[in-house]
Structure formats: C-alpha cells, structure tokens
Image (cartoon, helix red, strand yellow):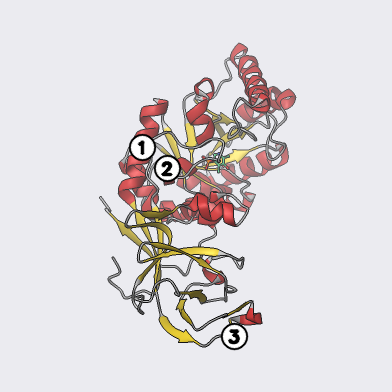
Amino acid sequence: MNPAGYTTWLEIDLAAVRHNITRLREITATPIMAIVKANAYGHGLIEVSRAALAARASWLGVARFEEALMLRQAGIAEPILVLGYTHPSHAAEAARSSIRLCLFDALIADAYAEAARSAGGNVIVHVKVDSGMGRLGVSPGESYDFIRRVKETPGLNLEGLFTHFARSDEPDSQATAAQLTAFNQVLTELDTADLRPPWVHACNSAAAITLPAAHFNLVRCGIAIYGLDPSPECPLPPNFWPALSWKAILTSARNLPSGHGVGYGHWYVTTEEEYVGTIPVGYADGLRRVVPNEVLIHECKLPVFARVCMDQTILSLQNLPNARPGDEVVLIGQQGDQQIRAEDVAARWKTNNYEVVSGLAARLPRLYLNPS
Ligand SMILES: *Cc1c(COP(=O)(O)O)cnc(C)c1O
C-alpha cells in the first residue's frame, strides 16, 4: 500500500489497535484508559484514539495539555486525563473542556482553583500519589491531608486518585508489591473518612497484565495497545498484534568497484565489486546512526554497515542481484515470512521498543489500514 508515491512511510493497522484493546478488556475485565501520549507512541494521536474508543476504551490519557486539546479539537468528547504537569495558565481551558488534570502540589492546586473560579467552573483533578516511583506525586504520608484540602477547595473537583509503578515490567518485583501496599494504605485512610474519589488507577500495561490486585476500577494501557511488549522480561500474552510497520522503497541499485568508500567517513569500503543500494531513510526519520541496522528486501534480512545519513542510508545488495529501484524495503514489520519487530530494533539500538516507535519522526507519512 503506497497510493501517494511515498518513498518511506509508516503503516498503522487500526484493526490491530482495536483488537489489542479488546484483548486487554478480556484479560483485565476492567475499564481501559488508552494511553496516547507522544502522538500515540508515534502511531498517530487522533486515529489511534478513535480506534481505541471504537473498541470501547473508556478513557484517553496523554502526557501534555496540548495533546488533550488536540483530541477535544478533533471532536473527541470522552474523558481525557493529562498525566503530566499542566501550567496553571491552561486551567480555565481545562475547566471549559473537561480535561482532567493531574495534581500533586498544593501551590499548583491553589492556582488551578483560582483560575477555575474566575472562569466560573471547576477543574476536574486526579491526585497522583508517589508510592515509590520518585517522580511526580504526593508522598503517601501526606496524601490524606492533601486530598482533604483538595476536596474542600472550591474550583477543584476531585475525581480520581492514582499512582504509577517503577518496576511492574519485572517478574515478581518486591518494589511493585511495596508500592501497591503504600497506595492501598492511602486508600484505607481515605475510606475511613469517606474521601475515596470515584476513579482509582495504578496499572500500566505490564501491571494490567500481571497484577490483577492493582486493577482498581481503571487501567492505563499504552504499549500493549500497540501490540508491543512491555519489556523482554514481560512479553505480551499470546494474540496481540503489532500495529506499526515502517516501509520504504529502494531508490538506487548499482555496482561499485572494489576498494570504493561508501558514505560519510567511508565507514564501509567495498572489498570486491559490489552491488550497492540506497534507501531514502535517515536519522532525521528516527533511524539511529548505529551500525549495523537491518532491513528486509525480497524477504531477506540484510545488515546495513554504512553510516546512516540524515535522509538516506546505503546498503549492500551483494546477495540480492535481482534487487531494483522501487522494490519494497521493510525496516519494521513483516515481509513474506520474515519479520523485524520493534523489539529487535530496540535490542540493536540498546534501548526499549517505546523509544524506537515514539522516536519515529513527524515527517514520516502515516497510512492507516482498516480505519473501521
Ligand atoms: C506512559 C504511562 C502509562 C502507560 O505505560 P505503558 O507501559 O505504555 O502501558 C501509564 N501511566 C502513566 C502515568 C504513564 O506515564
């Protein structure tokens, strides 16, 4: 599929997103907040959000206020939570658009409340407890007083309480157990004063899959809805489908004589007459400038030894004498019975699959398969 004559593009299978959400609903039997931050992990904010909601995800979660606004501007009316910090200058707009904000600080709480009151509305908030991640959140010991204060502040509408696990993608993590205990203690204190808000959530994908005791009444799933493993130690259960493929076309193919330098710095030098090709993909697309990368052409895995340029990469076609310009190249995804997974790319780049897909550049066209 390449109707517009693109030279490189992403294919996003929205049927896979819908299928994965359905699988998560089966596995967790809990309402799903689809995490669509960072342009839906590179997959496309609006299209993925619509697909997730079509498969009956009930909430959307983003990292930044601007992402939530884009969803509202696209006409999406379902509840949206901003997981990160929102500047108080957005609080009036948050109140108007019913965008839920994360709250973890008393001064910020006052600023939101003030803005909401002048706008004649309420900011709906979810208080974040730092049960052990050491990032955003109110300490467990201070949570009860903080929540009591939020509850009594006009202009704030306390709707949720949540926490986030640091090590839920590791098997049998003591750290995760300790975080859950700390979070449950906060909930117990709140229950004695009837202060538990309507929505309580703790799980990311890994915990949603492995830790039912932490489901509460909402799970926040990101990586799993894209069909990607939470970590090598915590692979997805069977029957999840990767949604994203990255393709390109071969743009040149020709013979170079023996001893010919290839690419910047001549990192690679031919040792015999060699058939060499180029693909129109570079580090400005999110392809790392490391050696070797790997691609599929004619259902063969080819290592790429030359240095990645900004917009192009050179590769040896020595084993593919029939390769011609225009042939399909796969950087992530399937070709015949061969496959390169985002997890394989992550291992080569010594990072995780999250960084691989969320680092795919905005300039790559996204083509959406199976839109409904
Ligand atoms: C990104 C994020 C998630 C989703 O994590 P996955 O591992 O992708 O499922 C959940 N909660 C918070 C607070 C996050 O920042």
Of residues 192 and 40, the one nearer the viewer is 40
Q: Secondary structure at mark 2?
A: helix
Which residue appears at 62% of the width and 40% of the height?
Answer: 113
- Give the mark nearer the N terminus: 3 vs 1: 1
Q: Mark 1 sits on what residue?
A: 239
The verdict on label 2 being within 8 Å of ligand 1 is yes
- Image position of 352 with respect to 271: above or below: above
- Give the mark nearer the N terminus: 1 vs 2: 2
Mark 2 → mark 3, Cα distance in angstroms:
48 Å
Q: Quadrant of residue 43?
A: bottom left
Q: Secondary structure at mark 3?
A: loop
Amino acid type, callout 3? Gly
Of residues 191 and 90, the one nearer the viewer is 191
Q: Mark 3 sits on what residue?
A: 259
The verdict on label 3 being within 8 Å of ligand 1 is no
Q: Secondary structure at mark 1?
A: loop
Q: Residues within 10 Å of mark 1 (few under 14, many from 20)?
A: few
Which residue appears at 43% of the width and 46% of the height?
Answer: 226
x and y percentages locating residue 292 in the rendered image: 57, 64
